[in-house]
Image (cartoon, helix red, strand yellow):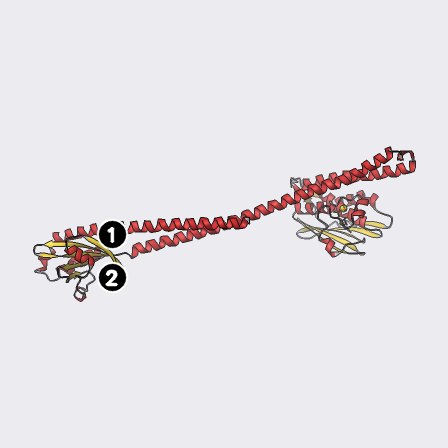
Amino acid sequence: MKKKVLIGYVIAAVVVLLAFEYSFWTNGFLYLEHQSEHSYLIQTELLRDLFLAEEVVENSAVKQDAFETFTDTYAEKYGIRLTIIDEKGTVLGESSGASELMSNHLDREEVQRALQGESNSVIRRSATFDVDYCYCAVPVESGSFRGVLRAAIPLQELYNMNNEFVRSTVFAVLILVALILFLGLYFRKYVMAMKKVEKMRREFVSNVTHELKTPLTSIRGFVETLKAGAIEDPKMAQKFLDIIEIESERLSNLISDTLLLSEIESKKDTKREPCDVNAVITEVVDLLQPKVREHVRLIFHPDPSVRPYSCNRDRLKQLLINLADNGLKATEFGAVTISCSSTNRYLVLKISDTGIGMEEEQLERIFERFYRVDKGRSKAQGGTGLGLSIVKHIVELYNGTVEVTSRPGVGSEFTVKLPY
Ligand SMILES: Nc1ncnc2c1ncn2[C@@H]1O[C@H](COP(=O)(O)OP(=O)(O)O)[C@@H](O)[C@H]1O
Ligand SMILES: [Mg+2]
Protein backbone atom coordinates (compact mmCIF):
# COMPACT_ATOMS: atom_id res chain seq x y z
CA MET A 1 0.00 0.00 0.00
CA LYS A 2 2.74 2.45 1.03
CA LYS A 3 4.70 1.56 -2.10
CA LYS A 4 1.68 2.39 -4.27
CA VAL A 5 1.21 5.75 -2.56
CA LEU A 6 4.88 6.58 -3.11
CA ILE A 7 4.71 5.67 -6.81
CA GLY A 8 1.50 7.74 -7.08
CA TYR A 9 3.28 10.76 -5.63
CA VAL A 10 6.21 10.36 -8.01
CA ILE A 11 3.91 10.09 -11.05
CA ALA A 12 1.85 13.11 -9.93
CA ALA A 13 5.03 15.15 -9.35
CA VAL A 14 6.38 14.24 -12.79
CA VAL A 15 3.06 15.07 -14.53
CA VAL A 16 2.83 18.47 -12.80
CA LEU A 17 6.46 19.17 -13.65
CA LEU A 18 5.93 18.22 -17.30
CA ALA A 19 2.74 20.32 -17.55
CA PHE A 20 4.55 23.28 -16.05
CA GLU A 21 7.52 22.77 -18.38
CA TYR A 22 5.22 22.45 -21.40
CA SER A 23 3.31 25.65 -20.66
CA PHE A 24 6.51 27.53 -19.85
CA TRP A 25 8.15 26.29 -22.99
CA THR A 26 5.20 27.03 -25.40
CA ASN A 27 4.60 30.51 -24.01
CA GLY A 28 8.30 31.24 -23.93
CA PHE A 29 8.73 30.12 -27.50
CA LEU A 30 5.74 32.15 -28.76
CA TYR A 31 7.10 35.22 -27.03
CA LEU A 32 10.53 34.67 -28.58
CA GLU A 33 9.00 34.19 -32.02
CA HIS A 34 6.93 37.33 -31.66
CA GLN A 35 9.91 39.39 -30.49
CA SER A 36 12.04 38.10 -33.37
CA GLU A 37 9.32 38.91 -35.90
CA HIS A 38 9.09 42.45 -34.54
CA SER A 39 12.82 43.10 -34.70
CA TYR A 40 13.03 41.58 -38.23
CA LEU A 41 10.40 44.05 -39.38
CA ILE A 42 12.34 47.00 -37.94
CA GLN A 43 15.47 45.76 -39.69
CA THR A 44 13.57 45.51 -42.98
CA GLU A 45 12.44 49.12 -42.59
CA LEU A 46 16.07 50.14 -42.08
CA LEU A 47 16.98 48.27 -45.26
CA ARG A 48 14.26 50.20 -47.07
CA ASP A 49 15.91 53.44 -45.86
CA LEU A 50 19.20 52.19 -47.29
CA PHE A 51 17.43 51.26 -50.51
CA LEU A 52 16.14 54.81 -50.84
CA ALA A 53 19.44 56.41 -49.76
CA GLU A 54 21.35 54.44 -52.38
CA GLU A 55 18.84 55.62 -55.02
CA VAL A 56 18.49 52.12 -56.42
CA VAL A 57 15.35 52.96 -58.46
CA GLU A 58 17.11 55.90 -60.13
CA ASN A 59 20.20 53.79 -60.82
CA SER A 60 18.11 51.06 -62.40
CA ALA A 61 17.33 53.41 -65.29
CA VAL A 62 21.03 53.29 -66.34
CA LYS A 63 22.16 50.03 -64.77
CA GLN A 64 20.02 47.02 -65.56
CA ASP A 65 21.02 44.89 -62.55
CA ALA A 66 20.78 47.64 -59.89
CA PHE A 67 17.99 45.78 -58.04
CA GLU A 68 19.90 42.48 -58.05
CA THR A 69 23.08 44.19 -56.82
CA PHE A 70 21.20 45.68 -53.87
CA THR A 71 19.43 42.46 -52.88
CA ASP A 72 22.60 40.35 -53.29
CA THR A 73 24.79 42.71 -51.25
CA TYR A 74 22.54 43.00 -48.22
CA ALA A 75 21.18 39.46 -48.31
CA GLU A 76 24.68 38.08 -48.13
CA LYS A 77 25.69 40.56 -45.45
CA TYR A 78 22.80 39.62 -43.11
CA GLY A 79 22.24 35.99 -44.06
CA ILE A 80 18.66 36.54 -45.31
CA ARG A 81 16.71 36.58 -48.60
CA LEU A 82 15.79 39.95 -50.10
CA THR A 83 13.20 40.53 -52.82
CA ILE A 84 12.10 43.73 -54.60
CA ILE A 85 8.64 43.55 -56.11
CA ASP A 86 6.86 46.21 -58.18
CA GLU A 87 3.21 47.18 -57.81
CA LYS A 88 2.17 44.62 -60.42
CA GLY A 89 3.76 41.81 -58.41
CA THR A 90 6.73 41.32 -60.72
CA VAL A 91 9.97 40.35 -59.00
CA LEU A 92 12.60 42.94 -59.96
CA GLY A 93 15.40 41.68 -57.79
CA GLU A 94 15.88 38.55 -55.71
CA SER A 95 18.96 37.62 -53.73
CA SER A 96 18.70 33.91 -54.55
CA GLY A 97 19.52 34.95 -58.14
CA ALA A 98 16.40 33.45 -59.73
CA SER A 99 14.27 36.58 -60.08
CA GLU A 100 13.38 36.01 -63.74
CA LEU A 101 12.13 32.50 -62.90
CA MET A 102 9.94 33.65 -60.06
CA SER A 103 6.17 33.77 -60.37
CA ASN A 104 4.16 36.92 -59.89
CA HIS A 105 4.12 37.79 -56.16
CA LEU A 106 0.89 39.75 -56.07
CA ASP A 107 -0.95 36.86 -54.42
CA ARG A 108 1.40 36.91 -51.40
CA GLU A 109 -0.43 38.23 -48.33
CA GLU A 110 2.48 40.36 -47.04
CA VAL A 111 3.04 41.88 -50.51
CA GLN A 112 -0.61 42.89 -50.82
CA ARG A 113 -0.64 44.51 -47.37
CA ALA A 114 2.64 46.34 -48.07
CA LEU A 115 1.23 47.69 -51.37
CA GLN A 116 -1.61 49.12 -49.29
CA GLY A 117 1.02 50.99 -47.27
CA GLU A 118 1.32 48.68 -44.24
CA SER A 119 4.68 47.39 -43.02
CA ASN A 120 3.87 43.81 -41.98
CA SER A 121 5.19 40.34 -41.42
CA VAL A 122 3.90 36.76 -41.74
CA ILE A 123 5.36 33.36 -40.95
CA ARG A 124 4.96 30.88 -43.78
CA ARG A 125 6.61 27.93 -45.45
CA SER A 126 8.32 29.07 -48.68
CA ALA A 127 6.77 27.51 -51.81
CA THR A 128 10.15 27.90 -53.57
CA PHE A 129 12.53 26.67 -50.85
CA ASP A 130 10.36 24.49 -48.57
CA VAL A 131 11.68 26.22 -45.45
CA ASP A 132 9.77 28.25 -42.83
CA TYR A 133 10.46 31.97 -43.22
CA CYS A 134 9.41 35.12 -41.47
CA TYR A 135 8.43 37.38 -44.41
CA CYS A 136 8.73 41.10 -43.61
CA ALA A 137 7.33 43.35 -46.33
CA VAL A 138 7.59 47.18 -46.32
CA PRO A 139 6.20 49.60 -48.91
CA VAL A 140 8.73 51.50 -51.06
CA GLU A 141 7.99 54.76 -52.86
CA SER A 142 10.65 56.51 -54.87
CA GLY A 143 9.55 59.07 -57.39
CA SER A 144 6.98 57.43 -59.62
CA PHE A 145 8.08 53.95 -58.44
CA ARG A 146 5.76 52.06 -56.09
CA GLY A 147 6.68 48.63 -54.86
CA VAL A 148 7.64 46.40 -51.97
CA LEU A 149 10.93 45.47 -50.29
CA ARG A 150 10.60 42.06 -48.75
CA ALA A 151 13.06 40.32 -46.43
CA ALA A 152 12.69 36.61 -45.76
CA ILE A 153 14.45 35.42 -42.60
CA PRO A 154 14.83 31.64 -42.16
CA LEU A 155 13.41 30.47 -38.82
CA GLN A 156 15.38 27.23 -38.70
CA GLU A 157 17.86 28.57 -36.17
CA LEU A 158 15.03 29.59 -33.86
CA TYR A 159 13.45 26.15 -34.29
CA ASN A 160 16.78 24.44 -33.66
CA MET A 161 17.16 26.38 -30.46
CA ASN A 162 13.65 25.39 -29.46
CA ASN A 163 14.29 21.71 -30.22
CA GLU A 164 17.49 21.83 -28.25
CA PHE A 165 15.59 23.30 -25.31
CA VAL A 166 12.91 20.58 -25.51
CA ARG A 167 15.56 17.88 -25.72
CA SER A 168 17.48 19.13 -22.70
CA THR A 169 14.26 19.57 -20.72
CA VAL A 170 13.14 16.00 -21.44
CA PHE A 171 16.60 14.77 -20.53
CA ALA A 172 16.57 16.74 -17.26
CA VAL A 173 13.11 15.37 -16.37
CA LEU A 174 14.25 11.81 -17.10
CA ILE A 175 17.30 12.26 -14.88
CA LEU A 176 15.06 13.70 -12.18
CA VAL A 177 12.68 10.73 -12.39
CA ALA A 178 15.61 8.30 -12.23
CA LEU A 179 16.99 10.17 -9.24
CA ILE A 180 13.64 10.13 -7.42
CA LEU A 181 13.26 6.39 -8.08
CA PHE A 182 16.80 5.70 -6.98
CA LEU A 183 16.37 7.70 -3.78
CA GLY A 184 13.01 6.02 -3.16
CA LEU A 185 14.50 2.55 -3.53
CA TYR A 186 17.51 3.45 -1.42
CA PHE A 187 15.29 4.87 1.29
CA ARG A 188 13.07 1.76 1.20
CA LYS A 189 16.09 -0.51 1.53
CA TYR A 190 17.37 1.58 4.43
CA VAL A 191 14.01 1.49 6.23
CA MET A 192 13.76 -2.28 5.71
CA ALA A 193 17.27 -2.82 7.09
CA MET A 194 16.40 -0.67 10.10
CA LYS A 195 13.21 -2.65 10.68
CA LYS A 196 15.15 -5.89 10.51
CA VAL A 197 17.69 -4.67 13.07
CA GLU A 198 14.87 -3.48 15.31
CA LYS A 199 13.09 -6.84 15.02
CA MET A 200 16.29 -8.72 15.85
CA ARG A 201 16.89 -6.47 18.85
CA ARG A 202 13.35 -7.05 20.16
CA GLU A 203 13.65 -10.80 19.70
CA PHE A 204 16.99 -10.80 21.48
CA VAL A 205 15.66 -8.86 24.45
CA SER A 206 12.67 -11.19 24.73
CA ASN A 207 14.92 -14.27 24.45
CA VAL A 208 17.36 -13.00 27.08
CA THR A 209 14.52 -12.20 29.45
CA HIS A 210 13.11 -15.68 28.99
CA GLU A 211 16.51 -17.33 29.43
CA LEU A 212 17.18 -15.34 32.62
CA LYS A 213 13.80 -16.10 34.08
CA THR A 214 14.11 -19.88 33.78
CA PRO A 215 17.09 -20.40 36.14
CA LEU A 216 15.80 -17.69 38.50
CA THR A 217 12.43 -19.46 38.83
CA SER A 218 14.23 -22.70 39.48
CA ILE A 219 16.50 -21.14 42.15
CA ARG A 220 13.54 -19.52 43.92
CA GLY A 221 11.59 -22.77 43.81
CA PHE A 222 14.37 -24.79 45.45
CA VAL A 223 15.08 -22.09 48.06
CA GLU A 224 11.39 -22.14 49.01
CA THR A 225 11.37 -25.95 49.16
CA LEU A 226 14.42 -25.89 51.41
CA LYS A 227 12.84 -23.30 53.68
CA ALA A 228 9.63 -25.33 53.80
CA GLY A 229 11.49 -28.18 55.49
CA ALA A 230 13.68 -29.95 52.94
CA ILE A 231 16.69 -28.44 54.71
CA GLU A 232 16.11 -30.94 57.54
CA ASP A 233 16.99 -33.82 55.21
CA PRO A 234 20.75 -33.44 54.59
CA LYS A 235 20.76 -35.66 51.47
CA MET A 236 17.88 -33.77 49.85
CA ALA A 237 19.31 -30.42 50.99
CA GLN A 238 22.65 -31.21 49.32
CA LYS A 239 20.91 -32.17 46.08
CA PHE A 240 18.87 -28.96 46.00
CA LEU A 241 21.87 -26.80 46.84
CA ASP A 242 23.79 -28.43 43.97
CA ILE A 243 20.96 -27.54 41.61
CA ILE A 244 20.92 -23.97 42.94
CA GLU A 245 24.66 -23.75 42.34
CA ILE A 246 24.34 -25.00 38.74
CA GLU A 247 21.48 -22.64 37.99
CA SER A 248 23.37 -19.67 39.50
CA GLU A 249 26.34 -20.51 37.34
CA ARG A 250 24.10 -20.68 34.31
CA LEU A 251 22.69 -17.27 35.19
CA SER A 252 26.17 -15.85 35.56
CA ASN A 253 27.28 -17.42 32.24
CA LEU A 254 24.26 -16.00 30.50
CA ILE A 255 24.93 -12.50 31.78
CA SER A 256 28.62 -12.58 30.87
CA ASP A 257 27.91 -14.04 27.38
CA THR A 258 25.24 -11.38 26.72
CA LEU A 259 27.58 -8.61 27.80
CA LEU A 260 30.39 -10.06 25.69
CA LEU A 261 28.13 -10.28 22.64
CA SER A 262 26.99 -6.68 22.92
CA GLU A 263 30.58 -5.57 23.48
CA ILE A 264 31.77 -7.33 20.31
CA GLU A 265 28.76 -6.09 18.36
CA SER A 266 29.44 -2.46 19.21
CA LYS A 267 32.82 -2.94 17.46
CA LYS A 268 34.66 -0.75 19.91
CA ASP A 269 37.33 -3.37 19.92
CA THR A 270 40.38 -1.59 18.52
CA LYS A 271 42.95 -3.05 20.89
CA ARG A 272 45.21 -5.21 18.72
CA GLU A 273 48.59 -6.75 19.43
CA PRO A 274 50.66 -9.44 17.72
CA CYS A 275 49.63 -12.73 19.36
CA ASP A 276 51.63 -15.94 19.54
CA VAL A 277 48.87 -18.28 18.36
CA ASN A 278 50.56 -21.45 19.67
CA ALA A 279 50.84 -19.88 23.13
CA VAL A 280 47.19 -18.83 23.14
CA ILE A 281 46.02 -22.34 22.16
CA THR A 282 48.25 -23.92 24.82
CA GLU A 283 46.67 -21.62 27.39
CA VAL A 284 43.19 -22.65 26.23
CA VAL A 285 44.08 -26.34 26.42
CA ASP A 286 45.33 -25.88 30.01
CA LEU A 287 42.23 -23.93 30.94
CA LEU A 288 39.89 -26.62 29.60
CA GLN A 289 41.69 -29.55 31.27
CA PRO A 290 39.15 -29.79 34.15
CA LYS A 291 36.40 -30.30 31.54
CA VAL A 292 38.12 -33.17 29.73
CA ARG A 293 36.29 -36.44 30.42
CA GLU A 294 37.87 -39.77 31.19
CA HIS A 295 37.77 -41.35 27.73
CA VAL A 296 38.47 -38.14 25.82
CA ARG A 297 41.77 -36.51 24.93
CA LEU A 298 42.28 -32.83 24.15
CA ILE A 299 45.05 -32.77 21.55
CA PHE A 300 47.17 -29.89 20.28
CA HIS A 301 50.53 -30.06 18.51
CA PRO A 302 52.02 -26.56 18.27
CA ASP A 303 53.22 -25.52 14.81
CA PRO A 304 56.30 -23.24 15.06
CA SER A 305 55.83 -22.02 11.48
CA VAL A 306 52.58 -20.20 12.36
CA ARG A 307 53.06 -16.44 12.11
CA PRO A 308 51.87 -14.20 14.97
CA TYR A 309 48.39 -12.81 14.43
CA SER A 310 47.50 -9.22 15.20
CA CYS A 311 44.29 -9.17 17.26
CA ASN A 312 42.78 -8.75 20.69
CA ARG A 313 44.27 -11.70 22.59
CA ASP A 314 41.16 -12.12 24.79
CA ARG A 315 38.90 -12.39 21.75
CA LEU A 316 41.07 -15.03 20.08
CA LYS A 317 41.14 -16.98 23.33
CA GLN A 318 37.35 -16.71 23.73
CA LEU A 319 36.81 -18.00 20.17
CA LEU A 320 39.00 -21.05 20.83
CA ILE A 321 37.44 -21.75 24.24
CA ASN A 322 33.90 -21.67 22.83
CA LEU A 323 34.71 -24.06 19.98
CA ALA A 324 36.83 -26.49 22.01
CA ASP A 325 34.31 -26.42 24.88
CA ASN A 326 31.52 -27.39 22.45
CA GLY A 327 33.70 -30.22 21.14
CA LEU A 328 34.36 -31.50 24.65
CA LYS A 329 30.68 -31.30 25.57
CA ALA A 330 29.70 -33.30 22.47
CA THR A 331 32.33 -36.03 22.87
CA GLU A 332 32.02 -39.11 25.12
CA PHE A 333 34.86 -41.11 23.61
CA GLY A 334 37.79 -40.16 21.42
CA ALA A 335 39.40 -36.77 21.05
CA VAL A 336 39.01 -33.08 20.48
CA THR A 337 41.86 -31.82 18.31
CA ILE A 338 42.97 -28.24 17.82
CA SER A 339 45.34 -27.29 15.03
CA CYS A 340 46.65 -24.08 13.54
CA SER A 341 48.51 -23.13 10.37
CA SER A 342 49.45 -20.10 8.33
CA THR A 343 48.87 -19.66 4.62
CA ASN A 344 50.00 -16.61 2.64
CA ARG A 345 46.87 -14.71 3.54
CA TYR A 346 45.19 -16.54 6.41
CA LEU A 347 45.61 -17.87 9.89
CA VAL A 348 43.68 -21.18 9.79
CA LEU A 349 42.33 -22.73 13.00
CA LYS A 350 40.67 -26.16 13.03
CA ILE A 351 38.77 -27.64 15.96
CA SER A 352 37.55 -31.17 15.35
CA ASP A 353 35.93 -33.77 17.57
CA THR A 354 34.75 -37.38 17.49
CA GLY A 355 31.46 -36.52 19.19
CA ILE A 356 27.77 -36.83 18.47
CA GLY A 357 27.86 -34.65 15.35
CA MET A 358 24.93 -32.81 13.77
CA GLU A 359 22.42 -33.15 10.93
CA GLU A 360 22.85 -31.02 7.79
CA GLU A 361 19.79 -28.82 8.50
CA GLN A 362 21.00 -28.11 12.04
CA LEU A 363 24.31 -26.75 10.74
CA GLU A 364 22.52 -23.80 9.13
CA ARG A 365 21.14 -22.67 12.47
CA ILE A 366 23.79 -23.30 15.11
CA PHE A 367 25.29 -19.79 14.80
CA GLU A 368 21.93 -18.21 15.68
CA ARG A 369 21.58 -16.79 19.17
CA PHE A 370 20.07 -19.23 21.67
CA TYR A 371 19.79 -22.04 19.12
CA ARG A 372 20.65 -25.47 20.52
CA VAL A 373 20.18 -28.81 18.82
CA ASP A 374 19.28 -30.44 22.13
CA LYS A 375 18.11 -27.82 24.58
CA GLY A 376 17.99 -30.17 27.58
CA ARG A 377 21.47 -31.47 26.98
CA SER A 378 22.89 -27.95 26.47
CA LYS A 379 21.29 -26.66 29.67
CA ALA A 380 22.43 -29.64 31.68
CA GLN A 381 25.97 -28.79 30.59
CA GLY A 382 25.61 -25.12 31.56
CA GLY A 383 25.28 -23.92 27.97
CA THR A 384 23.74 -20.59 27.08
CA GLY A 385 23.22 -21.10 23.34
CA LEU A 386 25.33 -17.99 22.71
CA GLY A 387 28.77 -19.59 22.31
CA LEU A 388 28.75 -19.99 18.53
CA SER A 389 27.06 -16.63 18.04
CA ILE A 390 29.99 -15.08 19.90
CA VAL A 391 32.41 -17.06 17.70
CA LYS A 392 30.71 -15.74 14.56
CA HIS A 393 30.89 -12.15 15.78
CA ILE A 394 34.57 -12.41 16.70
CA VAL A 395 35.33 -13.90 13.27
CA GLU A 396 33.43 -11.04 11.58
CA LEU A 397 35.35 -8.52 13.67
CA TYR A 398 38.49 -9.65 11.82
CA ASN A 399 36.73 -10.08 8.42
CA GLY A 400 37.24 -13.81 8.57
CA THR A 401 35.03 -16.85 7.99
CA VAL A 402 33.91 -19.84 10.01
CA GLU A 403 32.74 -23.09 8.41
CA VAL A 404 31.53 -26.37 9.84
CA THR A 405 31.29 -29.93 8.58
CA SER A 406 29.65 -32.62 10.65
CA ARG A 407 28.22 -36.13 10.55
CA PRO A 408 25.89 -37.53 13.19
CA GLY A 409 27.67 -40.15 15.28
CA VAL A 410 31.04 -39.41 13.65
CA GLY A 411 32.01 -35.93 14.72
CA SER A 412 32.32 -32.29 13.73
CA GLU A 413 35.00 -29.97 12.43
CA PHE A 414 34.98 -26.18 12.66
CA THR A 415 37.39 -24.23 10.40
CA VAL A 416 38.11 -20.59 11.15
CA LYS A 417 40.02 -18.47 8.61
CA LEU A 418 41.27 -15.09 9.71
CA PRO A 419 43.01 -12.87 7.16
CA TYR A 420 46.47 -11.53 8.13
N1 LIG B 1 31.10 -29.73 18.26
C1 LIG B 1 29.77 -29.87 18.31
N2 LIG B 1 29.19 -31.10 18.20
C2 LIG B 1 27.87 -31.25 18.23
N3 LIG B 1 27.00 -30.22 18.40
C3 LIG B 1 27.50 -29.00 18.54
C4 LIG B 1 28.90 -28.75 18.50
N4 LIG B 1 29.11 -27.42 18.64
C5 LIG B 1 27.89 -26.86 18.78
N5 LIG B 1 26.92 -27.79 18.73
C6 LIG B 1 25.47 -27.56 18.82
O1 LIG B 1 25.24 -26.19 18.60
C7 LIG B 1 24.52 -25.63 19.69
C8 LIG B 1 24.92 -24.19 19.87
O2 LIG B 1 26.23 -24.07 20.37
P1 LIG B 1 26.60 -22.87 21.33
O3 LIG B 1 26.16 -21.64 20.66
O4 LIG B 1 28.01 -22.98 21.70
O5 LIG B 1 25.63 -23.05 22.54
P2 LIG B 1 25.80 -23.95 23.87
O6 LIG B 1 27.13 -24.64 23.79
O7 LIG B 1 25.74 -22.98 24.98
O8 LIG B 1 24.65 -24.89 23.88
C9 LIG B 1 24.80 -26.52 20.85
O9 LIG B 1 23.76 -26.49 21.78
C10 LIG B 1 24.93 -27.87 20.18
O10 LIG B 1 23.64 -28.44 20.04
MG1 LIG C 1 28.91 -23.56 23.54
Checking the image for residue 37, the label placed there is 1
Q: Left or right: where does residue 290 sit relative to residue 24?
A: right
Please name whichever residue, 103 or 112, is drawn nearer the observer in this view of the structure. Answer: 112
Residue at figure coordinates x 78%, y 37% from the top left: 216
Q: Is residue 205 above or below residue 327?
A: above
Question: How many numbered discs, if any?
Answer: 2
Q: Which residue is mark 2?
A: 126
Q: Is residue 408 visible?
A: yes
**Which of the two labelled residues, at mark 1 and mark 2, occupies the earlier sequence position?**
1
Q: Looking at this rendering, what residue extends furthest in the bottom direction?
A: 101
Q: Is residue 312 visible?
A: no
Dot 1: element:
helix
Q: Which quadrant of the figure has residue 155?
A: bottom left
Expressed as whole percent of the image width and height from the top left, the position of residue 150 reads: 19, 56
Beta carbon of the mark 1 residue lies under 8 A of ligand 1? no
Q: Residues under labels 1 and 2: Cα distance? A: 16 Å
